[in-house]
Image (cartoon, helix red, strand yellow):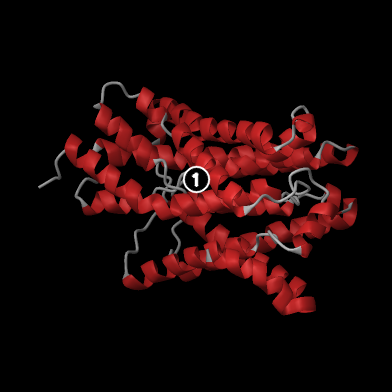
Amino acid sequence: MLGLVASQLLPGALGTAYPGFKATADTLLYICLGFIMINVGREFEIDKSRWRSYTADYFIAMATAALPWLLIVLYYIFVLLPSDLWTDSAAWKENLLLSRFAAPTSAGILFTMLAALSLKNSWIYRKIQVLAIFDDLDTILLMIPLQILMIGLKWQMFAIVGVVTVLLVVLLIAGWRWQARWNVRQDWKRILGLSAVVCALTQALYIVTARWYGPENSIHIEVLLPAFVIGMLMKHREIDTPTERRAATGISFLFMLLVGMSMPLVTGASAADAAAAATSITASQPMMPWGVLILHVVAVSALSNIGKLVPVFFYRDRKLSERLALSIGMFTRGEVGAGVIFIALGYSLGGPALIISVLTLVLNLILTGGFVVWVKKLALKSCTPEA
C-alpha cells in the first residue's frame, strides 16, 4: 500500500530523474522476484519414484489455478470493457495475461502456522504443500505461451520461439533429472547472489537479441522459471535462524513495495494523458471513480477465491472440513501473483483492470490473517496435534 502511494507521488517529485530511478527499481524488483522463486523451487520436494501418484494432484492444482483465472478473464472482458470490444482478439489476449495474477497461491504463512500447531504430519499440510507448489509451477509454465501470444508470431518470432522452447525444455529436464543434487550453501546472501546472476543473464539475452532483431522481436525470458529450476537443483537445507527469517521477510517486503511503486498514475492530468497515448486496449480505458473501483475489487476478490474451491469437489475420502480447509488455504495470495502483474506492466497493460488487480492482491494479503484462522479451526476439527 505504501508502494501504491509512492507510485503516485514519485513521478512529480523526481521529475526528470524519475526514469533512472524507475530503471533501478525495476532491476531490484526482478532480483527480489528471482530470490523468491529460488526459494519456491527449494520447497519443491517430490518423490520421483512415485510420480504417477502426483498426476491427480497436478490436475487438481491446475484446475484450482485455471478456474479463478478464467472467471477473472470473463469479468474483465464482459464487465469492464465496452460491448464493441467483447470480440476483439487483442482485448482477450491482454486480459488473459493480466488476469493470470489470480492463479497462483503462496501458502508459506499457512505452512508455518500448521507446523506451529504440530500438524506437519497431517494430511492437510502434506496435500496443500503439493498443491501450492504445483499451482505456482502451472502459473509459471502458462506464462510462457501467454507472453509469446503478447509478442505475436512475426517472421522473426518463429526462430525465437524455437530457441525459447529449447531453453525452457532444457531447464525443466535439468530440474527433474538433477533435482536436489546441488550441494551448495543456501543462506540468504548466496540465494540473493544467484538471483542477481539469473537477472543479469536474462537481461543480457534480451539486450543482445534486441540489438539483432529489434526490441519488439527480442527474446525476453522472465526470471520466474530459471530461478525456480535453480531452486529445484539445490539439495534442500533448512536454515531457520532469526537472521535468515529477517532477511527473507525483508526481501519479500521490498519486493511488494517495489511492485506497488511500479503502478502507473491513476488520477490527474498525467493519468489521462497516459490513457490517451496508450498502445494497449486495457491501458486506454478511462479510469473509474474510486468507489466503483472498490466495488470491482470486492467482486474480483470474491470470484478469485470462489475459483480456489476446486479441491472441495475432490478427495472424497476425506472429511468436508479437511477439503474446505485445503481450499481456503489456497486463497492465500503471494509474491508470484504480484510478479505476474509486474510482467503485465512490461507489456504496457494498464487502466482500471490493472488497478483492480493490484488492489485485489492487496485485499487478499490483508485478509490472509482471517484465512489462516479459518483454516486453523477446520484443521483442528479434523485432526489432533501429534504428541
Query: Seen in the image, is 348 located left or right of residue 96?
Result: right
Tell me which corner region of the image, top left, top right, bottom left or bottom right, holds residue 56.
top left
Which amino acid, mark 1? Trp
Residue 131, x across and y down, in percent: 41, 37
Q: Which residue is mark 1?
A: 178
Check the image and name the residue furthest to the top.
316
Examine the rendered structure and indicate whether residue 376 appears above or below residue 189. Answer: above
Examine the rendered structure and indicate whether residue 326 appears above or below residue 263. Answer: above
Q: Residue at x 39, y 70 (%)?
A: 246
* Closer to the camera in the image, 255 or 120: 255
Examine the rendered structure and indicate whether residue 336 appears above or below residue 144. Answer: below
How many other residues sit within 10 Å of disc 1, few (<14), some (14-19) or many (≥20)?
Answer: some
Query: Seen in the image, is 1 located left or right of residue 13?
Result: left
Residue 187, x across and y down, in percent: 42, 67
* Closer to the camera in the image, 350 or 287: 287
For the question of whether residue 127 can be seen, the reply is: no
